[in-house]
Image: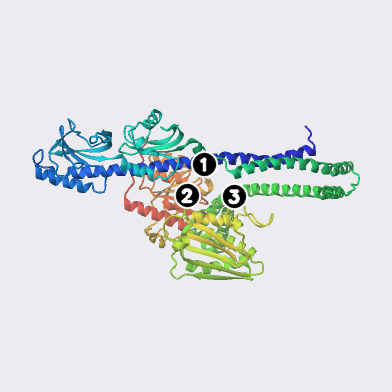
């Protein structure tokens, strides 16, 4: 429903003032509530504190009774003789000095000693017929006074006196109400009520009233409230007829203290300041409504002028900004006039923005398509490299057979050129496998003292001559265990980033040192152990802290579209993590960037790399039986011819399943030579592991162009295609020699 400006202003005033009025109401209510809570808290604290004082007074009597019950004067014959009775009486009087009340020693049916009588007074007085077997606090009791005197009231703590497990006396220490009346009167709150009650609900002391209320029972509703809890608040009517609110607290000895105040005072009073605020709020609300009505009349006219200007803008007519006397409305009218002039320009800019968005979308689509092409090309190059390695193996093995021919001396020139071509082709396949991501991981022990000076040439080819390279290697730096090619790639990626960060030249520093505990701080995922820290630092433009947080994320780059893939630092981080270490980047805008790689040191048993096939025996493979598992028929033919040329007997299998059938069928080769990547559900690594379980003594030599099972290099002998024939023969000789020294392997049992 349409609402006028006048109504809106009135609603605005109400919206502003009503929360204040609600706040005043809340203030009044909270003031009442706060005062009630303060009173209740004060009553509770008073009741607890004075209950503790009352309990302390009673506990003092209990302590005196307990101490006197242990007196040696009560040992011996019952009742004690006159001398021991007098000595005990004097002890009791000394114990009660400064305290009201008296001490009695009771036997069954009589009182033997009472400090209420003069010292040494002879004779016994009647007492209770039976003794109390347990310590207890007796409630308030009325004691008849002397002839013509008013009766006296008292409470008593009764302690049994035991000797050899027999109850012989009761020791009684009394408490007079007047002693507790002093505690009640000390609370000092005029108009408040303080009451001490015994464990039956009978009043022992009270303020105000004192002796007039001693011995009276409190009201039944308060007694019912006290039975269910040891302390709590209550509302009742006092014994003098005044509505009251209070708090009671019962001590462990069963006596209670009640602190109460008039109900009217407990509910509280509305402060005069709060009342003034409420009246002022009502007056302010009235003035605000009147002001809203006056202001609304002054606003309606400029608003109508704005409506006319908006209609002109909608119709495409020029907007006339006429002064209205209201600055805000004049500004809006001027803005409407400017908007009319800017619409055409905005439309042009919008069209330009849309064209840019379309272009960016096209670039993103191209990058996505390029990524897919790169992935497809990687798979293609991996397959081509694998097949090319097989062809190079055929050429290499065939060339070796040709060199054994009687006419080989006349072909040394072509054979040498062929060998160089094989070596060059092997290098090319390694590049293809690197691009495809299927290059075999070759872990080796590396010394930074030799490696970093040698890698300067590679770095300098990336950085150019305007950037100086410095290498600093600590003299005690330990060797590391990693893939040197991946480290090369990581340093190249860091060099490329440093080159872009120093367009006007600068300095790149390579440092290597043993990592300290400070270097390893802040890396919770780093495994315990010793590490070497390799830092690559430049003095380039640096990065902001917000960029540093994302620097290692894949595809994150600060370069413009098409200038960088965002995978360089991701490769660095991945290399360090796969090597068992970590990577850290620190950068400051205008100072430079430093990347630290923490790399695990080589174990002592890894520091020295044994020469390949060092345990090979001098004899050849002549007479040995080789099971050749190769899916490429041409490569298998040439390899078999090579082995037979050296006197070996060759068994052939085109895949793992065929090899397993031969072995289960009774074939007993001396060594198995198997390709890793083959068709079927199993590869060469699976065959080697199967043989390790079935025939542990049968040696296995694996050969591959690439392998995704890097674990195989640690488990078995792995050769790389194309493998030089001399290296292949050396590996087979070493395997056969080890097998012959170990003895013949048992045949695989038939299923």
Residue sitting at x 63%, y 43% = 276
Residue 72 in the image: x percent, y percent?
A: 13, 45
Contact between labelled residues 1 and 3, with CB atoms less than 8 Å apart: no
> Foreground mark, 3 or 1?
1
The answer to whether residue 291 is visible is yes
Query: Of 622 and 43, which appears nearest the observer?
Result: 43
Q: State which tag comes first along the sequence, 3 or 1.
A: 1
The answer to whether residue 414 is visible is no
> Foreground mark, 1 or 2?
1
**Residue occupied by mark 3:** 384
**Residue occupied by mark 1:** 35
Query: 10 Å neighbourhood of mark 1: few (<14), some, or many (≥20)?
Result: some
For label 1, the SS is helix
The CA distance from mark 1 to mark 2 is 105 Å
Q: Is residue 2 above or below residue 101?
A: above
Query: Of 178 and 528, which appears nearest the observer?
Result: 178
Query: Of 34 and 722, which appears nearest the observer?
Result: 34
Quadrant location of the C terminus?
top left
**Residue occupied by mark 2:** 640
Residue 201 in the image: x percent, y percent?
A: 34, 32
Is 119 on the left-hand or right-hand side of 649? left
Is 620 on the left-hand or right-hand side of 539? left
Q: Is residue 465 above or below residue 259?
A: below
The CA distance from mark 2 to mark 3 is 24 Å
Query: 10 Å neighbourhood of mark 2: few (<14), some, or many (≥20)?
Result: many
Q: Is residue 18 above or below residue 487?
A: above
The CA distance from mark 3 to mark 1 is 91 Å
């Amino acid at each position: 429903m349409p609402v006028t400006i006048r109504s809106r202003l009135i609603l605005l005033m109400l919206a502003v003032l009503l929360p204040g009025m609600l706040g005043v109401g809340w203030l009044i209510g909270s003031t009442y509530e706060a005062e009630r809570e303060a009173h209740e808290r004060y009553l509770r604290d008073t009741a607890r504190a004075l209950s503790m004082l009352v309990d302390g007074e009673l506990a003092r009597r209990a302590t005196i009774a307990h101490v006197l019950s242990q007196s040696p004067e009560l040992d011996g014959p019952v009742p004690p003789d006159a001398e021991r009775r007098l000595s005990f009486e004097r002890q009791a009087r000394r114990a009660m000095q400064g305290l009201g009340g008296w001490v009695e020693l009771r036997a069954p049916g009589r009182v033997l000693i009472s400090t209420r009588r003069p010292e040494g007074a002879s004779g016994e007085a009647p007492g209770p017929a039976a003794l109390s077997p347990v310590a207890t606090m007796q409630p308030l009791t009325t004691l008849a006074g002397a002839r013509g005197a008013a009766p006296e009231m008292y409470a008593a703590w009764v302690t049994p006196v035991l000797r050899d497990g027999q109850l012989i006396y009761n020791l009684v220490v009394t408490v007079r109400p007047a002693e507790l009346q002093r505690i009640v009167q000390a609370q000092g709150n005029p108009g408040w009520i303080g009451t001490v009650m015994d464990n039956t609900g009978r009043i022992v002391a009270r303020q105000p009233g004192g002796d007039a209320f001693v011995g009276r029972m409190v009201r039944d509703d308060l007694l019912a409230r006290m039975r269910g809890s040891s302390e709590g608040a209550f509302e009742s009517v006092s014994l003098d007829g005044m509505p009251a609110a209070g708090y009671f607290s019962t001590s462990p000895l069963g006596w209670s203290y009640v602190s109460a105040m008039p109900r009217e005072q407990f509910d509280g009073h509305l402060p005069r300041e709060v009342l003034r605020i409420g009246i002022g709020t009502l007056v302010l609300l009235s003035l605000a409504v009147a002001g809203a009505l006056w202001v609304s009349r002054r606003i309606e006219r400029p608003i109508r002028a704005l409506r006319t200007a908006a209609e002109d803008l909608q119709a495409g007519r020029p907007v006339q900004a006429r002064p209205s006397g209201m600055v805000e409305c004049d500004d809006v009218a001027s803005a409407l006039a400017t908007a009319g002039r800017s619409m055409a320009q905005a439309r042009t800019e919008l069209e330009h923005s849309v064209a840019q968005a379309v272009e960016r979308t096209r670039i993103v689509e191209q990058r996505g398509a390029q990524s897919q092409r790169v992935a497809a090309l990687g798979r293609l190059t991996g397959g081509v490299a694998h097949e090319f390695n097989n062809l190079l193996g055929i050429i290499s093995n065939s060339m070796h057979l040709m060199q054994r021919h009687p006419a080989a001396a006349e072909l040394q020139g072509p054979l040498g050129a062929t060998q160089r071509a094989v070596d060059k082709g092997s290098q090319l396949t390694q590049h293809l496998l690197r691009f495809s991501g299927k290059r075999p991981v070759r872990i080796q022990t590396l010394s930074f003292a030799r490696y970093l000076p040698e890698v300067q040439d590679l770095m300098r080819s990336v950085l150019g001559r305007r950037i100086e390279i410095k290498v600093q290697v600590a003299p005690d730096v330990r060797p590391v265990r990693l893939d040197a090619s991946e480290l090369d790639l990581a340093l190249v990626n860091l060099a490329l980033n440093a080159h872009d960060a120093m367009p006007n030249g600068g300095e790149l520093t390579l440092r290597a040192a043993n990592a300290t505990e400070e270097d390893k701080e802040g890396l919770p995922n780093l495994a315990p152990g010793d590490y070497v820290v390799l830092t690559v630092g430049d003095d380039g433009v640096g990065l902001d802290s917000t960029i540093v947080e994302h620097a290692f994320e894949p595809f994150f780059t600060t370069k413009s579209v098409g200038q960088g893939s965002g995978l360089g630092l991701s490769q660095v981080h991945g290399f360090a993590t796969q090597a068992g270490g970590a990577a850290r980047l620190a950068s400051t805008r205008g100072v430079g960037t430093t990347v630290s790689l923490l790399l695990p040191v080589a174990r002592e048993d890894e520091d020295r790399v044994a020469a390949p096939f060092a345990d090979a025996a001098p004899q050849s493979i002549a007479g040995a039986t080789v099971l050749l598992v190769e899916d490429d028929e041409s490569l298998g033919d040439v390899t078999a011819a090579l082995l037979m040329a050296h006197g070996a007997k060759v068994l052939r299998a085109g895949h793992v399943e065929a090899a397993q059938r031969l072995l289960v069928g009774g074939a007993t080769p001396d060594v198995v030579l198997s390709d890793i990547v083959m068709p079927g559900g199993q590869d060469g690594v699976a065959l080697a592991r199967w043989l390790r379980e079935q025939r542990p003594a049968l040696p296995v030599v694996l050969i591959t162009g690439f392998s995704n099972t890097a674990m195989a290099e640690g488990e078995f002998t792995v050769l790389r295609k194309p493998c030089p024939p001399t290296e292949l023969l050396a590996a087979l000789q070493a395997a056969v020699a080890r097998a012959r020294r170990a003895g013949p392997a048992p045949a695989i049992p038939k299923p």
